[in-house]
Image: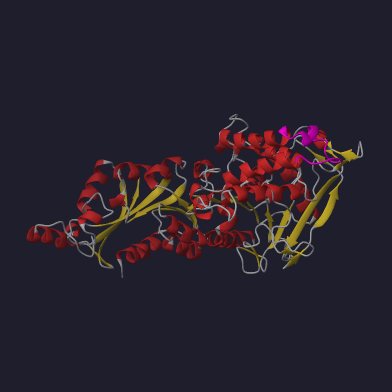
Amino acid sequence: MEVETQYTQFDSLNLDCGVTLNPVDCAYQTYGQLNTNKTNAILVTHAFSGDAQAAGIDKDTGQKGWWDNMIGPGRAFDTDKYFVICSNVLGGCKGSTGPASLDPATHRPYGMGFPVITMADMVRLQKKLIESLGIKKLLAVAGGSMGGMQALQWAVQYPDAVAAAIPIATTARHSAQQIAFNEVGRQAVMADPDWNGGEYYIGRPPARGLAVARMVGHITYMSDESMRQKFGRRTRENDDIFEVESYLRYRGSQFVDRFDANSYLYITKAMDLFDLTHNGDMTLTAALESATTRFLVISFTSDWLYPSYQSQEIVNALRRRNHDVAYCELESNYGHDAFLVEVKEQSELVRGFLAKTFKGMNR
Amino acid sequence: MAQLAVHNDIISKIIEPGSRVLDLGCGDADLLAWLADNKNVDARGVELDAQKVQRAISRGVSAYQGDLEECLHDYPDEAFDYVILSQTLLEVRQPLKVLKEMLRVGKRIIVAFPNFGHWSIRLAHLFTGRAPKNKLFPHDWYDSPNIHFLTVHDFEMLAAKESWTMERSIYLAGAEPLKLFPNFFAETAVFLIRR
């Protein structure tokens, strides 16, 4: 499946912080066909470093989509049945408006002048995109990690515009540990002199800092077991470095080529700010009160970055309202990365859940 | 017909179309999937075994992976028309607490279990002097999931003590219903109860 990113622009977007962005760009891809009733649309939401290319092979780069094994003909998100949409998040650096975009007021990149954004803001932009495609109600919103946060946010923010939510390996509020890892990443970026207060778009980007940030990230995405299996204590041939060191360095340097350091700061902050309970102002059960969607919540046994108890918190809050929710903790050694890797089991769950939702929506 | 299939058959006849049903220990959701397809029920299940939960969800049933004894208190009062506990009563740690919780979250509850008072169990115990093992209780004592053993009579005494209303009491020998001396002749029993 050869795919291509499309771009659209909206006049304005009001943000939680009170600022209005105008205009705002949104990069997206679609797979499959929208049915005549427009009841088969699924929004797939990407994780921290993802982009609009969720599936297929990019016709220019030859790159595979980040959830290609889950989206396509006959796959979990079956493009023979469903119309699948994925967009780059607000604050990103892959075609949607973010800190690297030009500020129309100054004609220079926003840099640190970009407003603070939230999960709700990202979802607001996605809602505009969905409306522009003529879709009133999504069949489902599905995503892992930060994508799962967006799925939850959708259910709370636009309950009438989505029939089902599939939050995977995620949380309803970022924990101290999750914030801590993000802060290490941000400090690594900002400690790099090339970061220059975010003003590096005409000079050198903070490549060393961003690479270190990414290395920390990758450790948190794996598990003790998966690292032992993948690297053990092996060293590289004719080299004094451990396999794991080499891997992290490679991942770090590769990331620098495809990601903007300021986007790193803004998006990790948006994750840290994410808390459906508004800092404990309300219970999670109360926070989910407006939600009318069905839920399929999935977690993984070895995921210590977004541990199962956080998914169970969501599920239990929903059960307290006797909400329609399915939950499964899948066995996996892959740590947080499992949501990208454990295709077979996830596919079975998603397929059955979507089919049931589709039946209900088209009754 | 196996015990489970017989009970599923009886339970599926009891449940009215369009009901909200919670099945505790729902397994692969055989019963719930059938009820959803044929009686248009809102089907929810609780199951501890991850692989069974996976199969249940893949069949379109909203199953929750968790311990039924830990999760019941989360459900609001009278959230369901029927709460089912089939085969699992013998395995729960605190049967009375579970039954009371079921009666809180369900308007009616359905409980099915094998009868430890059946004549074959009594005779086996009397003549072999060993823990009974037969088609009703197929496990050796050391690998049985069952931690409580009760007779039909035991259950009815508890129901009387708690003043539960027994709307239907179905005693079975195989798939056949029977009326006389159920505590001696019933292999299994299915009860429909309300507070």
Quadrant for the N terminus of chain B, please: bottom left
Q: Which colour scheme is used?
A: secondary structure
Please tell me whether residue A141 belongs to the stretch shown in magenta.
no
Q: Compared to A335, does A82 lie above or below?
A: below
Q: Position of residue B109 (x, y in %)?
A: 37, 50
Quadrant for the C terminus of chain B, please: top left
* Camera sees residue A115: no
Q: Give the range drawn in magenta.
A: A191-206
Q: Is residue B165 left or right of residue A228?
A: left
Q: Where is residue A268 in the image (x, y as percent from the top left)?
A: 68, 39
Please tell me whether residue A201 belongs to the stretch shown in magenta.
yes
Q: Position of residue B61 (x, y in %)?
A: 50, 58
Q: In which quarter of the image is residue B97?
A: top left
Q: Where is residue A143 in the image (x, y as percent from the top left)?
A: 63, 51
Q: In this view, does B14 lie to the left or right of A241?
A: left
Q: Which residue is drawn at 84% across and 38% down?
A: A110
